[in-house]
Image: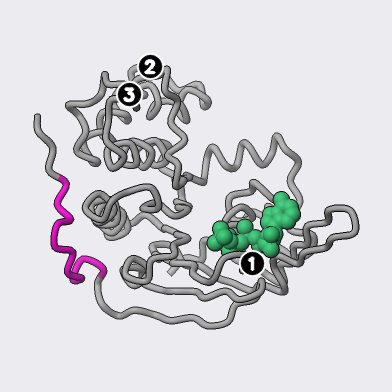
């Protein structure tokens, strides 16, 4: 197995005036390529901070972060943006799609930022649209889609640049259970096809679909649990992604 993420002795404190909050305290974590890791724990335990550090949106105060063999602990803003664009995909609870752009244009954005050729962008975007079963919605605007469809567009956008690591923050938080199940089913399929995923979730049913669960408490890793069961063996009653064409 190839190690994708190595965090050593990661500490993060937020300082606001007299107020000091230690969000992460001495985190050591290794993630292998192909893993599906769920991060769980009570509100305020540091889940989002950990995801932000993994995604180079925040920098740790102390410690070392290796992404494959690249030391990304102390990058400047431009270097972080470049590594993010090349190696990391994000999916947020609130989708974060641009309403003035079509579904196709939203998904194309990461490749536009890389100055890819239009012909290449078209091939890759159509491939991702097909993977999330939304080819028929390519010319729609995000506000013409259901929440579940919008989240699938966000997943397609996160994957179009073929990132090494997909970071997912509460992907089902804004969805009803049917759409939530379908999005989780999609994430499981993407993981089985080789995508490494780190997901923050409050939903214990969904965290057990991962291959490993990491429980945080007060900024520290309290426990880890490995799940032997293949994710798709879990029973999701209505998790089929069915789209009218
Ligand atoms: N920008 C910030 N400024 C100050 N304190 C912060 C900031 N971001 C997070 N914190 C604090 O750090 C701690 C960890 O926050 P974090 O958002 O990582 O928790 P979480 O586990 O993701 O919580 P939730 O489940 O409620 O989203 C909390 O006590 C929070 O108040």
Would residue 149 be seen by someone viewing this image from the given angle?
Answer: yes
Marks 3, 2: nearer the viewer: 3
Instruction: Find out if the beta carbon at label 2 lies less than 8 Å from the nearest ligand 1 atom.
Output: no
Q: Residue at x 40, y 26 (%)?
A: 106
Q: Quadrant of ligand 1?
A: bottom right
Q: Residue at x 69, y 39 (%)?
A: 79
Q: Which residue is mark 2?
A: 118
- Does residue 160 belong to the magenta stretch? no
Residues at discs 3 and 2 in contact (Cβ within 8 Å): no
Q: Which residue is mark 3?
A: 104
Disc on res. 86: none
Quadrant position of the C terminus in the picture: top left
Secondary structure of residue under mark 2: helix
- Range of the magenta residues? 231-241
Secondary structure of residue under mark 1: strand
Query: Which residue is more in the foreground, 114 or 180?
Result: 180
Q: Which residue is mark 1?
A: 7
Q: Overall secondary structure of the magenta stretch?
A: loop
Residue 66 in the image, given as x and y percentages of width and height? 64, 60
Q: Residues within 10 Å of mark 2 (few under 14, many from 20)?
A: few
Q: Is residue 130 left or right of residue 221?
A: left
């Amino acid at each position: 197995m190839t190690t994708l993420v190595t965090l050593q002795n990661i500490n993060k404190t937020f300082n606001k005036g007299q107020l000091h909050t230690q969000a992460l305290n001495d985190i050591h974590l290794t993630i292998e390529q192909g893993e599906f890791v769920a991060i769980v724990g009570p509100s305020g335990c540091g889940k989002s901070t950990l995801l932000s550090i993994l995604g180079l949106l925040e920098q740790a105060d102390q410690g070392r972060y290796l992404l494959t063999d690249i030391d990304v602990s102390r990058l400047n803003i431009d270097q972080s943006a470049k590594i993010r664009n090349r190696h990391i995909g994000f999916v947020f609870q609130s989708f974060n799609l641009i309403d003035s752009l079509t579904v196709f244009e939203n998904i194309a954005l990461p490749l536009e930022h890389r100055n890819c050729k239009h012909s290449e962008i078209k091939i890759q975007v159509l491939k991702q649209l097909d993977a999330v079963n939304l080819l028929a919605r390519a010319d729609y605007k995000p506000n013409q889609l259901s929440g579940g469809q919008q989240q699938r567009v966000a997943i397609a956008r996160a994957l179009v640049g073929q990132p090494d690591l997909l970071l997912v923050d509460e992907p089902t938080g804004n969805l009803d259970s049917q759409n939530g199940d379908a999005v989780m089913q999609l994430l499981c399929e993407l993981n089985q096809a080789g995508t490494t995923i780190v997901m923050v979730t409050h939903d214990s049913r969904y965290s057990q679909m991962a291959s490993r669960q990491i429980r945080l408490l007060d900024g520290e890793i309290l426990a880890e649990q490995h799940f032997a069961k293949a994710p798709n063996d879990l029973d999701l009653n209505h998790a089929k992604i069915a789209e009218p064409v």
